Image (cartoon, rainbow, N blue to C red):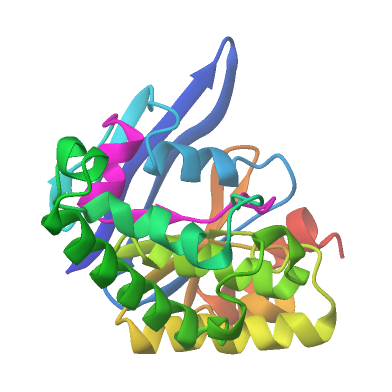
Amino acid sequence: MALLEVKNLGITFGGLRAVDDFSFKVKKGQLYGLIGPNGAGKTTVFNMLTGVYKPTAGGFTLDGENLTGRPPIEINRKGIARTFQNIRLFKDMSVIDNVKVGLHNGKKYTIAEGIFRLPRFFKEEKELDQRAMELLSVFGLEGERNALASNLPYGKQRKLEIARALATNPKLLLLDEPAAGMNPNETAELMDTIRFVRDKFDMTILLIEHDMKLVSGICEEVSVLNFGQELAHGITSDVLNDPKVITAYLGE
């Protein structure tokens, strides 16, 4: 059974149809790629899946539940988390506090208990600290827990953003161009990190990426968007060798 099922998804901005009649399925535990030229509509799809944009046609389900058009916070609580092409950390906050922002999505103490520092507040904050440290340890960031997020090297900032997304306890993780701005060594390490996240957290991952080496190295299936419409989909190696994809996307 598909964890994510997207059916006939579409959105129009004014007279421009940015995404048109787009359908695909992502199975539980799968690493699925969404590729295509700049401006093809890939991030727009992510924005619809996370509630930033409301589709004007079609919809999607997560675990069989229709989440089309729901607010971002509700979609996140139902199990979809994302990272961004341009890293969006809270750069003036510490590394551990960035992760705790994600963890607070599931906090149980009330505002009053937090304001007056009642016993339940301290108990939960201690548990959040422990959980945050566990996540940081997974990514080798525990030694920098008190450092400012802005002071981390680029590759570690990417890892921190993934850790913060995982802190919301998602079923589906959306990665928007995670290798953007990385050198080959950082990209190779990122590939290992993505595989590790999938295996360690039993995570389903949908990613947008322009680095074809990364896509061919970790994605089991891909869909190709071109001018907002599906050009091809299927097993990654087959799709990347499709003449239509080579012409439209790879420019060869």
What segment is highlighted magenta in the picture? 69-88
Q: Say left or right for 113 vs 238.
A: left
The image quadrant that residue 168 belongs to is bottom left
Q: Does the segment drawn in magenta span residue 74?
A: yes
Nearer-the-camera pick, 54 or 85? 85
Q: Tell me which residue sits at (56%, 66%) in the image.
A: 95
Residue 242 seen in render:
no
Q: Say left or right for 78 vs 55.
A: left
The image shows residue 107, relative to residue 27, as above or below, that is above
Residue 206 pos. (x, y %): 45, 64
Q: Does the segment drawn in magenta span residue 209?
A: no
Query: From the image, which quarter does the N terminus lie in?
Result: bottom left
The image shows residue 171, relative to residue 144, as above or below, that is above
Residue 175 pos. (x, y %): 53, 61
- Looking at the image, how many numbered discs can be counted on the residues? 0
Q: Tell me which residue sits at (21%, 41%) in the image.
A: 116
Nearer-the-camera pick, 183 or 24? 183
Query: From the image, which quarter does the C terminus lie in?
Result: bottom right
Q: Tell me which residue sits at (35%, 38%) in the image.
A: 8
Residue 124 pos. (x, y %): 20, 62
The residue positioned farthest toward the top in the image shown: 14
Residue 25 pos. (x, y %): 32, 60
The image quadrant that residue 213 belongs to is bottom right
The image quadrant that residue 160 belongs to is bottom right
Residue 137 seen in render:
yes
Nearer-the-camera pick, 43 or 92? 92
Q: Say left or right for 175 vs 73.
A: right
